[in-house]
Image (spheres, rainbow, N blue to C red):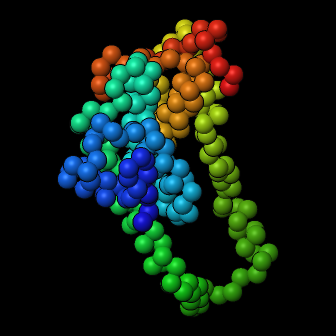
Amino acid sequence: MAITLSFDGFTGSPEELRRALRNGRVSVRSLPLLQLIDQALEQVAELDLPERGSLLPLLAELLERKLRALLKLDADEPEADEDEGESLVGLLVELDEAVRFLLERAEARSLVIRVPPADLPPDRRLGRLSVATLHRYARRYIRPRALLLDEERFGVAEAWRWLLAQLSRAGWLWFSRLELSSWADRTVTFAALLEGVRNRQIRLVQEEPFADLLIELEPEEERRPA
């Protein structure tokens, strides 16, 4: 079992939860959406997955569902309706299946004995050259390449500082206008947004489902300490 979900009256895998919903043992409206999302994210974070990057689209969508649930909770709306609850459980089933696949593949590959490649046969077309000759050739015909530096890490703290810098200009901005070119940047920025909502440092407004998000700075007196 890769992911285990637990709440009042149920403990089991996402697939078992979907079967419980279908046969009526669990009501969709009784699902604690935020609790289920947090459980799945925490368990995936604790797993030692060598190919975790392949889960990024599913994790990004799960973070987006958490953001929607927080917005509804902040607006005192019901936590889950029929379509939303079933859709979330389906997403958790997909994530569980993907995690299982990666774990099984990692286990299968752990049995493979790694053998270094054989040496290439000597090239008989060339005679042996001295180090001094090779050095003179390299200096004359080979230009040094620029060093390639590792890409700077973009984490939640960096994303939060970047968001505050963007908000400091007008006090608000649209999420769609943020220059987020990759799933990794979107995921990290979503996580930073959730922290800002939790600390009441920003407010998120969405006029209708799937509409663009308006990000606003909360007044100073409404904020909690970071």
Q: What is the x, y in percent for residue 115?
A: 56, 87
Picture quarter containing residue 209?
A: top left
On the question of residue 93 being in view, the answer is no
Relative placement, left or right, of 29 versus 113 is left
Left or right placement of residue 110 versus residue 161 in this view: left
Q: Residue shown at 40%/56% (left/top)?
A: 11
Query: Residue 178, image x and y in percent?
Result: 47, 25
Q: Is residue 28 above or below residue 195?
A: below
- The relative height of residue 217 versus residue 65 in the rendered view (above or below) is above
Residue positioned 64% across, 8% down in the render? 221
Between residues 141 and 51, which one lies in front from this camera angle? 51
Which quarter of the figure is the N terminus placed in?
bottom left
Q: Is residue 187 above or below residue 139?
A: above
Q: Is residue 214 left or right of residue 137?
A: left
Residue 146 x, y percent position in the rendering: 67, 50
**Which of 200/147 is in front?**
200
- Locate the C terminus by quadrant: top right
Front residue of 82 and 117: 82
Number of numbered tags placed on the structure image: 0
Q: Residue furthest front?
A: 9
Res. 166 image quadrant: top right
- Is residue 136 something one can see in this rendering? yes
**In which quarter of the view is residue 214 placed?**
top left
Question: In the displayed structure, would residue 136 be above or below residue 7?
Answer: below
Residue at image coords 66%, 49%: 149
Residue sitting at 44 percent across and 38 percent down? 34
- Residue 121: x %, y % from top left: 56, 91
